[in-house]
Image (cartoon, grey):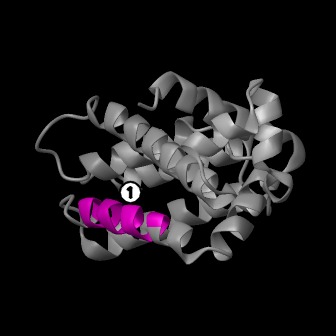
Amino acid sequence: MRKPEKLEELLNAAHNVVMRDGVTRLTLELVAREAGVSKGAVLYYFPTKNALIGEMLKTHLERNRQLWMDCLAQEPEGVPGRVTRAWIKSVRHCAGVKAQEGAGMLAAIANDPALLRIIHERIAVWKQELENDGLPAERQQVIQYAMDGIKFSELMGMNPPEGANRDQLIDYLLKLATPGSSL
């Protein structure tokens, strides 16, 4: 039986390798060395590098989802835009993904349609939740595209908004997600 703590240890080791060396240099051998286990132990959990990357991706998406749900718990019930505001706040609290990690993950995902499907499936669910949040459709779309732009620019390290500029942009999007607020 697979142990969750060992799985978490291996995922942490893989993350360390990716942050240090980039995902293109990620190997099961490096993960084993980083975790202080045999390659066979890594293979027990992850038969391939793509299986490992897929699990890293799922874990990353689930952590983001949990942060979103934690922010949602702080929003008042029954108020239009609460799901959207929680999403914006969760992105505010996320430390930007380093460009090296983001570009490497995108390259790995582009090479494996199964990994890309993981993202598509999660985004489809999240998009539906946002669309059912009670905000006017055009306002919701502007917020979604602006947030996607922030996340993508941070992921790729391509002129991301930083510091006070990022805070002001997110504050503006929060106002946009709050019915009756003056813009």
Give the answer, above or below, for where 83 lies relative to 16. Answer: below
User: Viewer-proximal residue, 3 or 92?
Assistant: 3
SS state under label 1: helix
The answer to whether residue 72 is visible is yes
Q: Position of residue 135 (x, y in %)?
A: 23, 63
The answer to whether residue 181 is visible is no
Q: Position of residue 47 (x, y in %)?
A: 60, 53
Residue 96 is inside the magenta segment: no
Residue that extends furthest to the left in the rendered view of this protein: 78
Instruction: Give the residue drawn at x 19%, y 34%.
Output: 76
Image quarter for residue 1? top left
For the record, the magenta segment spans 118-130
User: Viewer-proximal residue, 53 or 178?
Assistant: 53
The residue that mark 1 highlights is: 176
Q: Position of residue 3 (x, y in %)?
A: 46, 26
Q: Position of residue 83 (x, y in %)?
A: 28, 49
Instruction: Give the residue drawn at x 35%, y 46%.
Output: 85
Left or right side of 119 for 101: right
